[in-house]
Amino acid sequence: MSKEIIVTEEGLKNLQEELHYLKTVKRKEVVESIRVALGFGDLSENSEYDEAKNEQAKTESRIQELEETLKNVKLISDSDLHTESVNVGNKVKVFNEKYGEEIEYTIVGATEANALKNYISDQSPIGKALMGAKAGQTVKAQTPKGIMNIQILEITK
């Protein structure tokens, strides 16, 4: 039995768009690269051919991975969200005591994590510590940089 993968509506859309791109655009590009590389002759010394075949393997592997992920998706919609406690899909404004700063995270499933956007996975150390906690609580997160005390200031949709 495969593990359920929690995603937001935005995350599901992104996964579907990536799969569509790989199947309709990237596959054709890779096939064309292989065709061109075959024209260079001797395959035993043809680095372009080897590179194109490696790209084809990576593309097909990612397509397979995305198809498997999409089979096991559990969609979290806005109607499923509440603000009594932290869950996937919530925005959480916190105060990080170690760094003395406020930050807002969006809690997402593992496939959507993006540090640049402050989208943190429910499986990350901070995400795990926040899950299920309520506004006003302080949680401890065991991170690679040590234990962080994080006070939850606000939970929104």
Image (cartoon, helix red, strand yellow):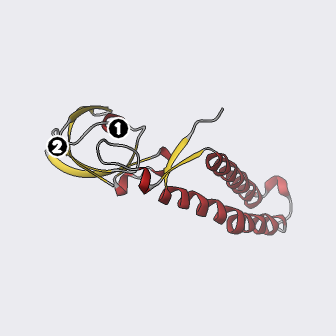
Q: Specify the farthest residue to the left.
A: 100
In what element is the residue under mark 2? loop
Question: In the displayed image of the protein, which residue is found farthest to the front?
Answer: 79
Left or right: 79, with 151 as reference point: right
Q: Quadrant of residue 27?
A: bottom right
Q: Is residue 71 above or below residue 15?
A: above
| Residue located beneath label 2 in the image | 99
Which residue sits at x=69%, y=69%? 25
Query: What is the x, y in percent for residue 33?
Result: 75, 66
62 vs 146, left or right, is: right
Q: Would you call the spot at circle 2 few (<14 residues within 10 Å), some (14-19), or many (20 or more)?
A: few
Give the secondary structure at mark 1.
Answer: loop
Residue 12: x %, y % from top left:
54, 56
Instruction: Read off the residue under disc 1.
Output: 131
Left or right for 104, reference 78: left
Q: Residue at x 18, y 50 (%)?
A: 102
Residue kind at label 2, given as amino acid type: Tyr
Above or below for 153 versus 130: below
User: Where is residue 29 shown, x and y percent of the image?
Assistant: 71, 68
Nearer to us in this view, 87 or 127: 87
Can you say which quadrant of the picture contains the C terminus? bottom left
